[in-house]
Image: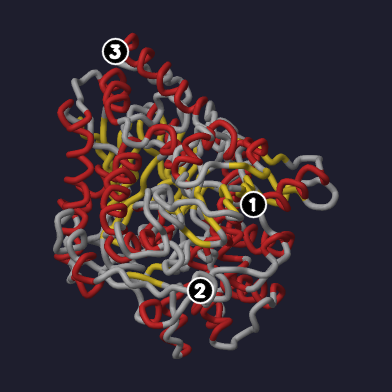
């Protein structure tokens, strides 16, 4: 299964690109594999929609890692 | 540690000792307690019975990074309830060096005074040479008169005219008088008391020292390490500042646009963090994208924005400014937004409240959305005190009433900051239920593990965020450190214990925050507030935010569990 990751984190541009994953992987597991804390290190959107960590990734999903909202 | 009480009617003062057992009360916790105990909740905010309280955070002056914030509190003329607004800068450091945890200003007067506090006491001088002029001009004159080393609190013409948008400013470490206690109209309370400026002269005073240096140093080492390790505090804020939020809120549909009518702005790429950084770097000169407001701060979220010739225009340009004075007004030009921001600073008004007020005026057709020259004209009318300027200067709720506009983004009379509540529902809960009125710093839910477009989990997220925010506000820690420190209250307890020399636990700190929220709600109940005031304007429940495709649908009954009649009250 292929998903596309786009990182808006200027300090983790290395995460952008195509990934091949086994089926059944959740977006929470993917973010964890990047060594990022959900919500605290990145806000995550899949296919322009907010999702929970338990969302199971599908073929062709577009995962965006956004700068977390910590105030401002 | 002492408390200084100044009677502005009679221009007299007295010092009071703060008992050791009260040293855990600082910042917002202290302003809330004093306002609750000493101000009748029915008092007129601009009258003789209101008090203006300036209080250092518990750690302010300790020289730990990002801990030099000071709180200003009073009964708010904007919300009618208790109010606390805090800022960084250097004045808190000076206040602490003078041995003061807090100053309570009492009484009112018709003229304006400059109050100078030094190691031997307090002096009063007429403020006539500093009135009716831009803050940068009066601040420069005050520095020339009292010395370049002093700390300074100052109001602008808006405060002199007692406008509800008026704030109080102090200087950053580079003497820019642009660090605002902006929210709640506290500049009008200062104006009513005749306080034009407060000078803090720490000549001949030694720096503060922790009472238990070994314990403090050990905790500080861990604190600094966490700040360095966290991507937000070590990379995001130094590089992009608070403007980093803009692309995310745009994506979520939570970027206030054209009077909060939607959550995405079509010109966002012209005003986002990248555009700001590239503009600053390309122009060079006095500009810098990375700057600190407090000495020793490692986060350095501030910046200095230069003009095309590289001369400083203002500092800082932040996400709240760019949203409320930019996308919220349909303005997609950084230079135009910066000019509006600069004049807000010069007249001494809250950029959030003023941006929201102009947004409502645009909805009313006073000027069209996108008209930056018209917006600047309205701002100058505010500075001149014309009737239209006074309407804008009275804040968003008042503009809505006068022009018959029902879509007004306020709670408890105070304008919403730059997070559209249908696109970020936890913030909507905080806006509704916080005793402070619509205020993102009262409990930011942006990093909570919730789906921000759904109602589920938002009340719990807001409750936790409100307690956390109160802790930071009371200790004097910048909320931008929260990414690295939030929830690690054992470390904060160690820092506090080492600094004030008392045995303080994490539970003590959390309890102090809960007690503070209860005190604030109790004051508001006395001022006549009920759960009716814990609601967003009705159109947010009924009209879809086109960008997020959501309405605000967190059930009122659930919000009531943490509002003025709920568990935090």
**Nearer to me, A5 or B69:** A5
Q: Along the polypeptide, which appears first: circle 1 or circle 3?
A: 1
Neighbour tally class for label 3: few under 14, some 14-19, many 20 plus, Cα within 10 Å = some
Using the numbered discs, state the Cα–Cα distance from disc 1 to disc 3 in whole angstroms: 42 Å
Residue to which mark 2 is pinned: B260
Question: Which of the chains bears the disc numbered 2?
Answer: B
| Residue at image point 66% right, 50% down | B273
Badge 3 and badge 2 both on one subunit: yes
**Nearer to me, B18 or B453:** B453
Find residue A3 and report its horizontal and vertical position in percent: 60, 49
Question: Which of the chains bears the disc numbered 1?
Answer: B
| Residue at image point 41% right, 77% down | B397
Residue to which mark 3 is pinned: B212
Q: Is residue A56 above or below residue B166?
A: above
* Contact between labelled residues 3 and 1, with CB atoms less than 8 Å apart: no
> Which corner quadrant of the image does residue B286 belong to?
top right
Using the numbered discs, state the Cα–Cα distance from disc 3 to disc 2 in whole angstroms: 50 Å
Q: Along the polypeptide, which appears first: circle 2 or circle 1?
A: 1
Q: Nearer the viewer, mark 2 or mark 1?
A: 2
* Contact between labelled residues 1 and 2, with CB atoms less than 8 Å apart: no
| Residue at image point 15% right, 60% down | B566
Q: Is residue B530 left or right of residue B261?
A: left
Question: Which of the labelled discs sits on residue B208, or is there none?
Answer: none
Find residue B102 and report its horizontal and vertical position in percent: 30, 39
Mark 3 lies on a secondary structure that is: loop
Find residue B543 and report its horizontal and vertical position in percent: 43, 82
State the residue lying farthest toward the bottom: B404
Question: Which of the labelled discs sits on residue B137, or is there none?
Answer: 1
Q: Along the polypeptide, which appears first: circle 3 or circle 2?
A: 3
């Amino acid at each position: 299964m292929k998903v596309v990751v786009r990182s808006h984190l200027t300090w983790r541009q290395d995460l952008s690109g195509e990934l091949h994953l086994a089926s059944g992987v959740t977006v929470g597991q993917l973010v964890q594999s990047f060594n990022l804390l959900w919500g605290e290190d990145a806000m995550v959107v899949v296919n322009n929609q907010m999702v929970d960590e338990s969302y199971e990734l599908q073929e062709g999903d577009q995962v965006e890692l956004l700068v977390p909202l910590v105030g401002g | 540690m002492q408390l200084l009480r100044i009677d502005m009617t009679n221009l007299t003062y007295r010092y009071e000792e703060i008992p050791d057992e009260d040293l855990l009360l600082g910042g917002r916790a202290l302003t809330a307690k004093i306002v609750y105990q000493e101000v009748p909740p029915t008092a007129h905010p601009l009258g003789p019975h209101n008090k203006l309280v300036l209080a250092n955070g518990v750690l302010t002056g300790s020289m730990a990074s990002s801990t030099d914030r000071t709180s200003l509190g009073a009964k708010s003329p904007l919300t009618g309830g208790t109010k606390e607004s805090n800022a960084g800068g250097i004045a808190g450091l000076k206040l602490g060096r003078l041995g003061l945890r807090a100053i309570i200003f009492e009484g009112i007067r018709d003229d304006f005074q400059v109050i100078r506090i030094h190691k031997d006491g307090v002096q009063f001088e007429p403020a006539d040479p500093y009135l009716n002029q831009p803050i940068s001009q009066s601040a420069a004159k005050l520095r020339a008169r009292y010395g370049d080393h002093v700390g300074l609190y100052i109001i602008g013409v808006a405060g002199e005219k007692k406008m509800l948008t008026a704030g109080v400013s102090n200087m950053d470490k580079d003497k820019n008088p642009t660090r605002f206690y902006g929210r709640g109209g506290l500049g009008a309370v200062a104006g009513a008391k005749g306080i034009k400026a407060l000078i803090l002269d720490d000549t001949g005073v030694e720096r503060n020292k922790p009472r238990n240096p070994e314990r403090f140093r050990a905790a500080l080492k861990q604190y600094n390490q966490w700040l360095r390790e966290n991507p937000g505090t070590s990379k995001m804020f130094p590089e992009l500042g608070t403007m980093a939020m803009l692309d995310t809120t745009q994506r979520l549909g939570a970027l206030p646009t054209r009077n909060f009518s939607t959550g995405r702005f079509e010109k966002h790429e012209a005003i986002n963090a990248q555009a700001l950084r590239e503009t600053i770097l390309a122009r060079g000169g006095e500009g810098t994208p990375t700057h600190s407001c407090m000495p020793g701060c490692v986060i350095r979220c501030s910046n200095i924005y230069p003009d095309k010739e590289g001369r400083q225009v203002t500092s800082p340009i932040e996400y709240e400014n760019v949203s409320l004075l930019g996308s919220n007004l349909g303005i997609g030009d950084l230079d135009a937004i910066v000019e509006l921001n600069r004049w807000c600073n010069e007249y001494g008004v809250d950029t959030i409240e003023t941006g929201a007020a102009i947004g409502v005026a645009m909805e009313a057709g006073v000027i069209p959305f996108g008209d930056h020259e018209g917006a600047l004209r309205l701002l100058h009318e505010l500075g001149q005190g014309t009737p239209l300027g006074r309407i804008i200067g009275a804040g968003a709720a008042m503009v809505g009433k006068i022009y018959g506009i029902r879509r007004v983004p306020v709670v408890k009379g105070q304008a919403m900051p730059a997070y559209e509540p249908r696109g970020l529902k936890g913030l909507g809960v905080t806006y509704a239920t916080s005793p402070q009125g619509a205020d993102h710093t009262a409990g930011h839910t942006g990093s909570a593990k919730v789906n921000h477009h759904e109602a589920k989990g938002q009340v719990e997220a807001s409750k936790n965020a409100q307690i956390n925010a109160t802790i930071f506000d009371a200790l004097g820690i910048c909320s931008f450190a929260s990414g690295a420190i939030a929830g690690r209250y054992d470390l904060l307890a160690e820092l506090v214990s080492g600094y004030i020399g008392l045995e303080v636990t994490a539970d003590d700190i959390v309890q102090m925050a809960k007690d503070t929220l209860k005190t604030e709600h109790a004051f508001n109940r006395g001022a006549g507030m009920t759960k009716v005031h814990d609601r967003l304007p009705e159109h947010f429940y009924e009209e879809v935010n086109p960008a997020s495709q959501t309405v605000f649908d967190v059930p009122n009954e659930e919000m009531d569990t943490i509002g003025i009649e709920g568990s935090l009250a």
